[in-house]
Image (cartoon, rainbow, N blue to C red):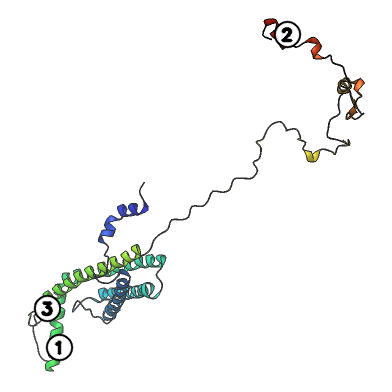
Amino acid sequence: MDLPVQDFSSRYYWARAISPLRCCGCFSNRLGSGVACLIWAALSFYFAVLAFMNQSPFYSHLDDVPLIVFGVINLLFGCITLAGFVIILVLTPRYVRVRMMVYIIGIGVVMVLVDMLVNFILFAANQDSFQSWCIDHSKMVVQNSLQQSNLNLPSDTDYYNCDRLFANQMKWSLLSVFAMFLVYIHWMLVITAFAGTSFFLLPPRVAAPPPPPTTVAPPPSDMAAPPTEVLGNLPPSTKSYKSVRPFRKKTDASILAMLGLKINDNGRVIHIADEHNLPYYDDRSQHGNYYTDSCSKEGLL
């Protein structure tokens, strides 16, 4: 029979193998989880503010709809991670709250990473849109700098190295997506390891069996049992006994009289009778001694 610890080790071996023992190799899982939630909250609020300002820390140009979606997701994730920081480090961590927090943070991490990957794909697929925006924006900046409104520059010529800018931003955004996947998943595993190794689930106590019943009802029968009389149901006796000694029989009195003893009406011996009333037995010497007679006949005496 396997112990619960052996059963847990066999069932969750790979989950324990990939769970980090320390956050970033130096912090405990509880402290690392709190720090990770705090950094998550700061980054998410920063990304949300830039997205609502129609800007992005990864791309020079992106459509408005992906930016708004990215900002809303990061705003929600920032609130979730801030609540996780309070639950882990400020309040006393409890298993139910920490477990629920792990589920919610896991959903938030998946949403942020998926949105980052989708934005990268959209940026890589819209190179023509980025190039036209880059040329128009650079042309406007040059005109504002030179203060010449009659400056005509062709829009199809890459005077501003927009292709090179697009290639650089592709590298930067790809590196950012890879780093976010690596860091976010590591921090998620740290929080999961904290929730899975810092609490012990005790099995419910086994209730004691109920005490046996004091009286057991007799099995039903077709015929009614006759009423049983006990001492408490019997009426008191009307006879009175003067002595617990039983009365002597009449034959006992005659036998005692033959022995020369007188008894009263109650059967008790009063006194011994006179000597002449005692029964007479012949002397044994008249009849001789069997031992002496036998010895004399044999000539031994």
Give the SS element for disc 2: helix
Q: Answer yes or no: do the residues labelled 1 and 2 have beta carbons within 8 Å?
A: no
Q: Which of marks 3 and 1 is in front?
A: 3
Q: In this view, does 63 lie above or below 198?
A: below
Task: Give the residue furthest to the bottom.
Answer: 147
- Amino acid tagged 3: Leu
The Cα–Cα distance between marks 2 and 3, rounded to whole angstroms, is 161 Å
User: Counting other residues with Cα less than 10 Å from the Cα at mark 2, is it few (<14), some (14-19), or many (20 or more)?
Assistant: few
Which numbered mark, 2 or 3, is in the foreground of this view? 2
Query: Which is more foreground, mark 1 or mark 2?
Result: 2
Dot 3 or dot 1, earlier in sequence = 1
Q: Distance between the residues labelled 3 and 1?
A: 16 Å
Label number found at residue 293: 2
Q: What element carries label 3?
A: helix
Q: In which quarter of the image is residue 225?
A: top right
Q: Where is residue 53 in the image (x, y as percent from the top left)?
A: 27, 82
User: Quarter-wise, where is residue 89 in the image?
Assistant: bottom left
**Badge 1 is on which residue?**
141
Question: How far apart, in angstroms, are the residues tagged by discs 1 and 2?
Answer: 172 Å
* Of pointers 2 and 3, the one earlier in the residue sequence: 3
| Amino acid type for the residue under numbered disc 2 | Asp
**Closer to the camera, 147 or 229?**
229
Q: Name the residue under label 3.
A: 165
Crowd around label 1: few <14 · some 14–19 · many ≥20 (10 Å)? few
